[in-house]
Image (cartoon, rainbow, N blue to C red):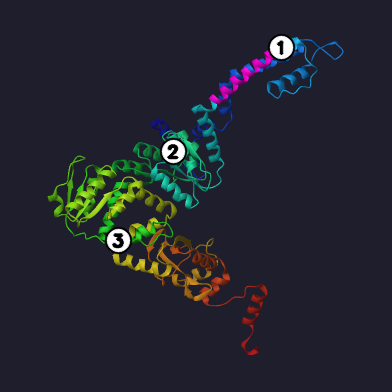
Amino acid sequence: MTSPLFLNWTRIFGTRDDDGEPGYVPSDTLRLAIEETAAPEAGILLVLRRLRLPIILVIFIFAVSVLGLVIIPGHDAHGHVTHMSLFDAFYFVSYTAMTIGFSEITPLTTVQRMWVTLCIYLLVTGWAYGIGSLLSLLQDQSFRRTISRRHVTRKVRRTAEPFLILIGYGPTMRSIARALDELDRRFVVLDTRESRVSSVDLDAYKADTPALLGNARDTRNLVLAGLAHPLCEGVLALTNDDRVNLDVTMTTALLRPGLPIISSTLSRPMAARMQSFADCDVINGLDRFGDHLRIRLRAPAAYQLMVWLTSAPGTALPPRRPIRADGGRWVVYGKGQFATELRADLEAEGVPVTVVSKNEGEGLEDAELETAFAFVAAGDDDTGNLWLLEAARRINPDLFTVALEHAPSNVPLFEALDVDFGMTPSTLMTIEVMARLAHPTLMKLLPQIPRLGDQWSRDMLQRLVERCGPRKADLWRIDLDESDAPAIQPWLERGDVTIGDLLRDPADRDAVLRMVPLALIRDEEAQPGPGDDEILRPGDGLLVAAHRGSRQALDGTLSDPIAATFVMENRVVPSTWVGRKLARRGDATPSGAR
């Protein structure tokens, strides 16, 4: 874990930018991390150290062979005594040692042939020893890790696009990585398991994804993974080890103040420690399970809308399955933190709950389930939960069933059992994280939806289906400022633009674009479901659900003055310079002269 002395030193002596705010990384820390792989000497020295003896041996045998051929006398075609030149001897030994073996030199004497024969055996032995040492080096784990580490860090330093750092590459992070890849978002993976690091390349992402082997609790590994890179846009620490998540959160908050952090924990005290140290999003998968169930109990249409908005584009509208909150007593079978959290969530909704804590393998009691309304299987593994659900339904076929699904691979088994409500913590984590990363504006809207009432959600779902169809449309944020909406600024400043006006089709002003405004963003606050008569102001933002064709049409209204004039004033402006000149001249002509 990062040394507390180092953390305090960082707070006091960390570099600061021109505005007096903390800088990216203290220079000493950055230098120590980069020096490990930035210079080529690390890999070269390791090669020379391991191959030093084989290289020296081959060079020695080569030199002795050349020297012997120079010293030993030979005869030319006329019987005169000759000596090979140094170059001829080097040339002869070179093609002999390389097993090429063609002959261009004057025929050798018996003594020279005896010397060459000895040299051949020595050179073959030296080459065999050298090649064996090289193969052994290539199979050495420390050498391979050194080369891989250097290769990965070079790719990170040369990254020219914004990227995220993913701590760990378990099932949850892998599903998040795939979702990020679908959105063309770049990321770097840091994990302690070599098998997981190797699997990154096998997952075949669109872009080359750097994956670094190392412990995230080592500050140097975080820096090498890109924490000091100016294009790093956030860190995701979603491992199963709360100490790792806490350490990453603390280190990131100190070295990169203000950098977005998303972390996870199953402990409320640990979540409080993370949030007290850094302004980060902390997700508790088990707690969120209960929150989802509470929303479905209280507002099934709101839950249906929230699930649909956080799903992938093109997803069909999920079915709405209301639950009677006053249906009767719930039985939660399980023990541990999840059962405690779920009991508190259900009792907060006024639902009577009975928690049954038994050891694995103990049967269910008929009396507990015959009069119950719902049964929750909250065991420690999926096999046990599947057995509990089947046994409970044999006792009471009318039970509303809820299951904690541990492994995503077992989800089809629960679906085959027709469980009424079930989710895996990894699925919940993926939904929560992607909602924050893909659509940060959506996170300002989602917490308000359950409080708006179920009727509001029904109306919004109806508008979405009528305008965008039964499959989820893309979500977009539109900023009505000078850079993104220059063409409509004059009307915005006069207060003449309503949402209904803005959403007119520039090709047919009487038609409405296939687009639904979900929220109006004003002063960084989200106003859900604005009406068509809402007057827009300069600098406002809109979160809309729309198909790509409608988005392109709206972009034309926002950027093209001719399209904006037609949409706002129902007036056609000539598209050519000559036409506009003639139109202005015609407007300036006195009525009596016409």
- The residue pinned by badge 1 equals 115
- The residue pinned by badge 2 equals 196
**Image coords of residue 529 (percent x, y):** 38, 66
Pick whichever of labels 3 and 2 is earlier in the sequence: 2
**Image coords of residue 219 (percent x, y):** 45, 34
Q: Nearer the viewer, residue 68 or 149?
A: 68
Count of numbered labels shown in the rendering: 3
Asked whether 130 falls inside the magenta stretch, the response is: yes
Crowd tier of the residue under label 2, counting other residues whose Cα lies within 10 Å: few below 14, some 14–19, many 20 or above:
some
Distance in Å between CA atoms under marks 2 and 1: 55 Å
**Quarter containing the N terminus:** top left
Q: Main secondary structure of the magenta part?
A: helix
Crowd tier of the residue under label 3, counting other residues whose Cα lies within 10 Å: few below 14, some 14–19, many 20 or above:
few
Q: Marks 3 and 1: which is nearer the front?
A: 1
Q: Residue at x 71, y 12 (%)?
A: 115
Q: Which mark is residue 441?
A: none
